[in-house]
Amino acid sequence: MKAAKTIYRPTLFIGNEGRPRGFELDNLFRAWIPFNLGRETIRSLFSELIKKKEAPLKVLMPEFICADVPEALNGLNVDITWYSVDIFNLDQLNIDVNLLKSHDCLFVVNYFGLATSLQKLNEAPNLIVIEDNAHGFLGRDLSGELLGTRGDFGIFSLRKTLPISSGAALFCSTMHSEIEKTIREVQQKKELIEVSVSKTTLRDFSQIIPLKLFHWLLSVKRNLAKNASQSEKLTAESKRISFPGELLLRLDPDLERERRKRLYEECLGLFEPFKEIIKVIPFNEKEIPYGFVFYLVESSKLNRIRQKIENSGMDLIKWPELPAVIESKYSDEHPYKNVYFIPFIW
C-alpha cells in the first residue's frame, strides 16, 4: 500500500505576538457569545425566543439540513414548517412571501460557505431571521457583509472550519439586546477553557502511513468525535465552555481565505476527469469554501470518485444526515441525498 499523498495544508495561524490593531474580525469577536456546540447555541437561543409567546413559535426550517438542528429543538414550544431548497442554487431563498409573513422565525443556512441571499426578506420586516453560519466563518456576501451577522441572530460553529474539537458562538443584532444580555449572563457564569488545535494530528502522518490505514483512522476519528458530540448535554447545566479564544487571536483571515481558495482550485483540477458525472457547486470571490462541494449525477460512479480522492490523501463526506421526516419523504435519487464534499480541515 502506498503512503497517502495529500494536497491538504493546515489552517494558517500567525505567531504568538497576536493580531495587529484594526483586525477586521475584532467587532465580531467582541459581540458574540461563546458556546461549546452549535446545536447547544441553537437551543439556548430558541429557549429565549419562545418565552414571550403563549402560542408555539412558528419556525420556517429548510428541508436540506443536518438532523442535529431540529433535534436541538426537541421539547421546545415550536411549530416547524419545512421549506424546500434547490441544491443547484443554494444561495437562493425561494419561499413565498405570504409564508414568510405568516411565521415568526426563519432559519436560513449559508451552505458550505455560500452566502444565501436575504434580499427577499425585506418584504417580511417582522420575521426573525436566524442565520446558520456553521459553514461560513470568514466569508462575506457580494456587498461585503460578514456572513453570520446579516440577520437578527447568527450561529457560528467554529469547530467546523478550524482544527479544533469544540467551539461555537452566537451573534445577536443590536435589535435584540435584551435576549443577548440574558444569554450572555448565563454563559458568563461558566468556566471558559481554552481549546487548542486538535484535528491536524493525523494529517501530520499522511505522507508516511499507508492509504488504507490513513483513511481508516480518519473514519474512526470522525465517528468518535460524532459520538462524543452526541453525548454532550444541550442544557444550561454545563459548567464549562471550551472555546478557541486565544487561537482566534492568532488566525490570519487573509491567509486562511487564500488557503481554502487554493485547495478549491486544486480540487477542480482533480475532478476534471469526472466533469460529466458531477455538478460542482461554484463560489464567488467573496465567499470562502467550507470544502469542495459537488452533486453526484451518476451514483454508480461513486466508488471510482472515492478511490481518486483517497489516493490524493483526502476524505469524502456525504452531507447532510437528513432529519428522519425528510429522509423518509424522498427517494435515494433525490438531489438532497447526492451531495458530497471534501472537507478542508480533517
Image: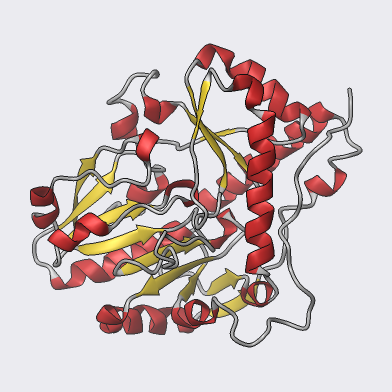
Q: Looking at the picture, how far across and down is residue 127, in whole percent? A: 17, 63
Q: 228 or 271: which is nearer to us?
A: 271
Quarter of the figure with residue 205: top right
Quadrant in the picture for the N terminus: top right
Q: Is residue 86 above or below residue 169?
A: above
Q: 231 or 211: which is nearer to us?
A: 211
- Identified at 43% across, 61% down, the residue is 40
Q: Looking at the picture, how far across and down is residue 204, in whole percent? A: 84, 49
Taking the view exactly as shown, the residue that stands out farthest to the bottom is 21
Is residue 54 something that shows in the picture? Answer: yes
Q: Looking at the picture, how far across and down is residue 223, in whole percent? A: 62, 40
Chosen colour scheme:
secondary structure
Q: 93 or 155: which is nearer to us?
A: 93
Q: Please state if 162 lies on the left or on the right of 50 as rendered.
A: right
- Identified at 51% across, 16% down, the residue is 299
The number of callouts visible is: 0
Q: Please state if 112 lies on the left or on the right of 127 as rendered.
A: right
Q: 76 or 148: which is nearer to us?
A: 148
Taking the view exactly as shown, the residue that stands out farthest to the top is 300
- Identified at 69% across, 43% down, the residue is 221
Q: Is residue 262 above or below residue 232?
A: above
Quarter of the figure with residue 186: bottom left
Taking the view exactly as shown, the residue that stands out farthest to the right is 208
Is residue 234 something that shows in the picture? Answer: no
Q: Looking at the picture, how far across and down is residue 126, in whole percent? A: 14, 67
- Identified at 13% across, 58% down, the residue is 56
Q: Please state if 248 lies on the left or on the right of 75 as rendered.
A: right
